[in-house]
């Protein structure tokens, strides 16, 4: 199984009907996305892509919180931390 592809696909599919937001995070496909110990790590090959995803961090937070994928998002460039963002799931409805 391609776990990196599945996590990326989950986030992108969340916005499949909201094209303006989908375009802002489209570069997620060019990054390695993986999860470990409750942290979603997005390792970008290019500094520009890492900065674009950092600017769209609020858009990334929503599906991660809704799908309960992670408690924190780390955006990396060549293994160096660019942005660390907590995922606030307190506003989610509990049934």
Image (cartoon, rainbow, N blue to C red):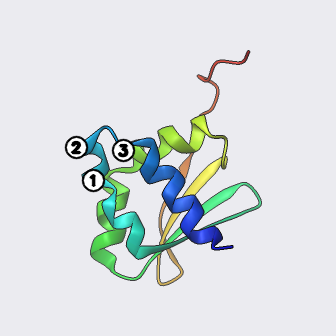
Q: Quadrant of the N terminus?
A: bottom right
Near-viewer residue (71 or 93): 93
Residue at disc 3, secondary structure = loop
Label drawn at residue 46 = none
Near-viewer residue (83 or 15): 15
Q: Residues within 10 Å of mark 1 (few under 14, many from 20)?
A: some
> Pointer 2: what residue?
20
Residue 39 sits in quarter: bottom right
> Pointer 3: what residue?
16
Does residue 84 show up?
A: no
Does residue 73 show up?
A: yes
Residue at screen point 51% across, 41% down: 63
> Pointer 1: what residue?
24
Residue 59 sits in quarter: top left
Residue at disc 2, secondary structure = helix
In this rendering, the label closer to the viewer, 2 or 3: 3
Q: Is residue 66 left or right of residue 37?
A: left
In three-dimensional space, the C-alpha distance between marks 1 and 3, rounded to whole angstroms, equals 12 Å
User: Where does the image place residue 93, in percent across and percent down from the top left?
Assistant: 64, 18
Residue at screen point 71% across, 18% down: 94
- Residues under numbered marks 2 and 3 in contact, where contact means CB atoms less than 8 Å apart: no
Q: Earlier in the sequence, mark 1 or mark 3?
A: 3
In three-dimensional space, the C-alpha distance between marks 2 and 3, rounded to whole angstroms, equals 10 Å
Residue at disc 1, secondary structure = helix
- Residues under numbered marks 2 and 1 in contact, where contact means CB atoms less than 8 Å apart: yes
Query: How many dots with numbers?
Result: 3
User: Where does the image place residue 47, in percent across and percent down from the top left?
Assistant: 33, 77
Near-viewer residue (44 or 17): 17
User: Where does the image place residue 34, in percent across and percent down from the top left?
Assistant: 62, 68
Q: Is residue 95 left or right of residue 45?
A: right
Q: Residues within 10 Å of mark 2 (few under 14, many from 20)?
A: few
The image shows residue 14, relative to residue 46, as above or below, that is: above
């Amino acid at each position: 199984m391609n776990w990196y592809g599945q996590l990326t696909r989950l986030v992108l599919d969340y916005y499949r009907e909201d094209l303006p937001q989908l375009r802002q995070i489209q570069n997620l496909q060019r990054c390695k996305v993986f999860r470990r110990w409750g942290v979603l790590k997005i390792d970008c090959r290019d500094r520009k892509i890492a900065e674009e995803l950092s600017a769209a961090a609020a858009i990334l937070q929503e599906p991660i919180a809704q799908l309960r994928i992670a408690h924190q998002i780390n955006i990396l460039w060549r293994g160096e931390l660019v942005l660390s963002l907590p995922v606030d799931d307190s506003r989610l409805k509990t049934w």
